[in-house]
Amino acid sequence: MTSTTSPRTDQDEVGWETAPTLIDGARTLQLTVGQCNLDYWFTAVAQGMLAGLANGHRPGTPVPGYMREPGPLRTALISELGFRGMAEEKAARAISFLVESAPDIPTMEFYATQLIDEARHARVFRGHISELGVSSREMQNVVRELSGPDIEAVIEPLERFAQPVRDARDFVGGVVLLTVLVEGVLAPAAELSERKWRMLDPAAAEIERGAGIDEIRHLTVGSSIIRNHLVAAPQEASRLRSLIDEGMEMWVKVPMLEVLRKREELFQEGMQQYASVVGDYEIWPGTRLLETTPGERVEKALTWSFEMQQERLTYMGLAPLPAADSDGAAD
Ligand code: FE
Ligand code: FE
């Protein structure tokens, strides 16, 4: 660790040293709009967790020199951050709809904070691309070239899928889209990323960690909104369930797996060049990162995603996703 002191907050779920991992937090914590209002966000997040950060990481955390050298490792990180930065920007813009259509003030306040969180994520992901030596003049072209096709193939279909929900001014449908179909699906890839960059680019891993702590709040509060809605209006379950099923079908059709595999293959090539930096570091207990393959890492993210979704959907009052070999008659 560096001499820089960690930002402090007395809220464990947003503390740098005390917050659980994204996956554990999303599975076990229960947070609500009542707790996570604007006041909480200012004190625990803006003046707590985010206090003193520079570019989304502690100012003394290094960006190793080799991360600025052209090669597969740098390309892997730029293309990942480019993709995720654009996705975050799109999320921030889409959340304006939830701010606008929120049914009450605490919910409006929560989505106003989430909008800023996502805009911040987009900013710090882009900021790290600059820390890797890409000038602001080159930024747009570099990101468009490395990540544009993946955004077009994966995120744009999702935006088209979401449009009818927005057109219908369907607030709860919008929360389901965001919580279950966007963040619920993408969060495990973010957790994987934080773990795999920890040794090779500690600043990138800290940026991811900060975004992950925010993500726990987004996933848990979003789930509690859906749960409360279904307690008050149980007849809504089948409509929301169909929305989730259609969304999951859309995910099967977009090439997300190919994007993840390509990302992991580039990372693998780069990691092998700097094997001595990675050393014996374990990506998860009992497994050394150096011994993992791209396929295994993708597989792990998918397993986390599936398990997390099952638990969250059960909590929300929506039946777990049917197993792959069932005929889908879950109700
Ligand atoms: Fe985000
Ligand atoms: Fe989020």
Image: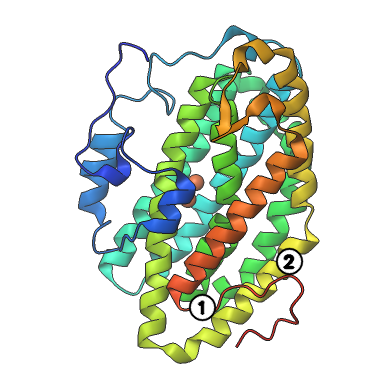
Q: Secondary structure at mark 2?
A: helix
Closest to the observer: 279 or 305? 279
Residue 153: image x %, image y %? 78, 51
For disc 2, the neighbor class at 10 Å (few under 14, some 14 to 19, many from 20) is some
Position of 287 with respect to 110 (left or right) is right
In the orientation shown, which residue stands out farthest toward the front? 286
Position of 79 with respect to 286 (left or right) is right
Position of 309 with respect to 295 (left or right) is left
Q: Quadrant of the N terminus?
A: top left
Q: Secondary structure at mark 1?
A: loop
Q: Amino acid at mark 1?
A: Leu
Residue 45: image x %, image y %? 29, 41
Closest to the observer: 162 or 291? 291
The residue under the point 34% across, 41% down is: 19
The residue under the point 69% across, 40% down is: 297
Mark 2 and 1 residues: CB-CB less than 8 Å, in contact? no
The residue under the point 41% across, 51% down is: 25
Q: Earlier in the sequence, mark 2 or mark 1?
A: 2
Q: Quadrant of residue 58?
A: top left
For disc 1, the neighbor class at 10 Å (few under 14, some 14 to 19, many from 20) is many
Decide if residue 67 is in sight here.
Answer: yes
Q: Which mark is residue 250?
A: 2
In the orientation shown, which residue stands out farthest toward the top? 65
The residue under the point 30% across, 59% down is: 109
| Residue position for label 1 | 318
Q: Quadrant of the C terminus?
A: bottom right
Closest to the observer: 291 or 50? 291
Decide if residue 68 is in sight here.
Answer: no
**CA distance separating discs 2 and 1:** 19 Å
Residue 145: image x %, image y %? 77, 32
In the orientation shown, which residue stands out farthest toward the bottom? 235
